[in-house]
Amino acid sequence: MNLETEGTAKPHRWQQVLYILAPFFLLLVCLGFINFVPDRLTAVPTPTLQSKTQETTVSPATATNTLPTATIPSTPTVIPTATLPPDAVIELLGPPAGSSFRRSDTISFYADWPLPLTGAQQLAAYIRIDGQSPILLGTLEEPNVGQRYRWQMNIGEMVETAVTLEWWVQLQADTGLPPLLSSTSRQVTVLP
């Protein structure tokens, strides 16, 4: 009886080894087939343009009467426009509306733009002092605080009295075109 159990154990082990090695062997055969098959059997043919040459005969009478004229086709000027997602918003992070600062303070303006700026795009921060003309605070072409944008200014260099300061951020293309997108504006107070 001892011989029977030993005799049946050996074929069982060979079956296990065969079941383990068979997938690896099959994989090697497939990889070898893929690598050694010529490219012309698996490649997609590239379409080529074939033109038939057509001979034209020109009579001497028509050759002298017709002169070729060069015409330059007019091509419309293509102005690249950026397409923005409809839900794209420039979010102002700080300072919050209604904040107060002293003239000696340095004010930091923070904004968030969720998309990467492409090519000629930049974020520009503007301020307006007491309703006057907008003043460009600065432009940024990449985030400078993690994934966010920051501009700083020393307000004492610009004003001498108490003022209301309005600020906002615009997404612009540096080609001088109108802004692609503008944030809402916020007002802060500068104390004397």
Image (cartoon, rainbow, N blue to C red):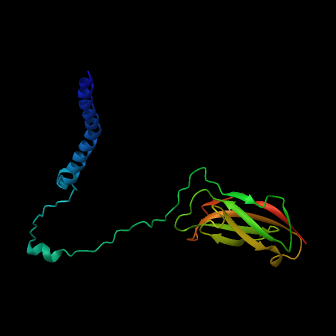
Is residue 62 shown left or right of residue 192?
left
Residue plotted at (78% across, 64% down)? 166
54 with respect to 117 (left or right):
left
Q: Within the image, what quadrant is residue 109 found in?
A: bottom right
Residue 69 versus residue 32 in the image, above or below: below
Q: Residue furthest front?
A: 2
Q: Position of residue 160 (x, y in %)?
A: 87, 77
For the question of whether residue 39 can be seen, the reply is yes
Quadrant in which the N terminus is drawn: top left
Please indicate whether residue 113 sits to the left or right of residue 65 in the image.
right
Q: Which one is nearer the viewer's eye here, 124 or 105?
A: 105
Residue 71 spot, x, y in % from top left: 30, 72
In the image, 52 versus 97, the foreground residue is 97
Asked if residue 80 is positioned above or below residue 39 in the image, the reply reads below
- Residue 68 in the image: state x and y as whole percent: 22, 74
Q: Nearer the viewer, residue 152 or 180?
A: 152
